[in-house]
Image (cartoon, grey):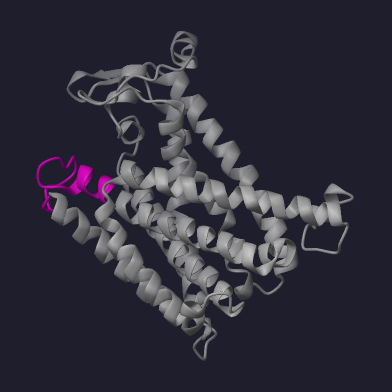
Amino acid sequence: MLSRSLGPEFGGSIGLMFYAGTLLSGVLNAVAFVEPLLSNFGWADGDITHTFPEGERWHILYSSVLLAFCTVVCLTGARVFAKASTVLSTFIIASTAMILVSFALQRPFVNEEKAIHYTSWSLATFQENFWPDLAPIAEGRPSETFGTVLGVLFPACIGVMAGASMSSALRKPSKSIPKGTLWAVVITFVLYLTIIVCLGSTTRRTTLRDNFNVLQEINILPIIVPIGAITTSVTSTLSGVLSSASILQAIAKDDLFACLRPFKRVSRSDNPTRAIVITYVISQLAFFMGDTNAVAPYTTMFNLIMFGFVNLACLVLKLAASVNFRPTFHYFKAWTA
């Protein structure tokens, strides 16, 4: 779409940004996979059991195992990916539902050892948390800013482009992409906003700042939260690997970069095998960037550039009044049909 509206050279260069942002999104989720794993099952800090060794090298190993597993699944084809995502999404839906139910059923309690101050629904708690207080989250660190918070939060919203990145695997992309993407935006926004308001109305600010497992600690079924978090990391890593490989293949097919020509070939099952393999190699190297807070700002930067140029391309198409991919909905009924 970018190549056709802004020119192949311009579109190809922005496509590389798109590829980098999607790849880093997968890396971010593979790195984030380690946090709920070790906070619940780590030798030193595990709340449930003490099973997995901890340390920087172990963190990289766990992320590498997840990445290798997701790469193997992606190499088997988009159908297996879709089936795996459907099964795993069941756990995510159950976890999200239980979080919302817990806000309604959990009674007020205090756990000083874990810095938990749960007030249940309270107007005073909501008013206390309403205004920002960008203080350091740990001793020796500078105060957080709007930019640092955006850098960590924004990657949670970029999954809405996953369908567009896999358009070649869709039966009716012209219908599925706009409908699926717009519904993904709406549902994601509503769920995120609901959980934010519920947390701000029931949990003290000190708890939100000092205990990153707060959703698990206040849940009536605590084990469901790490299961949902780990499952989310797996599905998002799967999506990151396959989506970024599909983008790389699309760029290679335009023959803009000679070095990318080998990646335009597909397997007999129309799977971008070579693109998946090189994506795995680059992702593996990216693990040495650091933890979640180190990877997230780069993910945000590349994706903001990508989204900005996608909007620019849409504007160019609109000003040119040309027939294009953009959906037109005269009635809401036509959109939901």
Give 232 or 102, whichever is nearer the viewer: 232
Q: Measured along the vertical axis of the image, is residue 64 above or below residue 319?
A: below
Furthest residue toward top: 124
Identify the residue at image location x=41%, y=56%.
24
The N terminus: image quadrant: bottom right
How many numbered discs, if any?
0
Residue 108 position within the rendered picture, expressed as x and y whole percent measured from the top left: 35, 18
Horizontal side of residue 229 vs 127, given as left or right: left
Q: For this view, does 206 lie left or right of residue 57?
A: right
Q: Which residue sits at x=47%, y=19%? A: 201
Residue 293 vertical placement versus 179 (above, below) = above
In the image, residue 196 above or below residue 126: below
Residue 98 seen in the figure? yes
Question: Is residue 49 inside the magenta stretch?
Answer: yes
Q: Position of residue 150 (x, y in %)?
A: 47, 35
Magenta highlight on residue 36: yes
Give the position of the C terminus as an image quadrant: bottom right
- Span of residues in magenta: 33-54
The answer to whether any part of residue 336 appears in the image is no
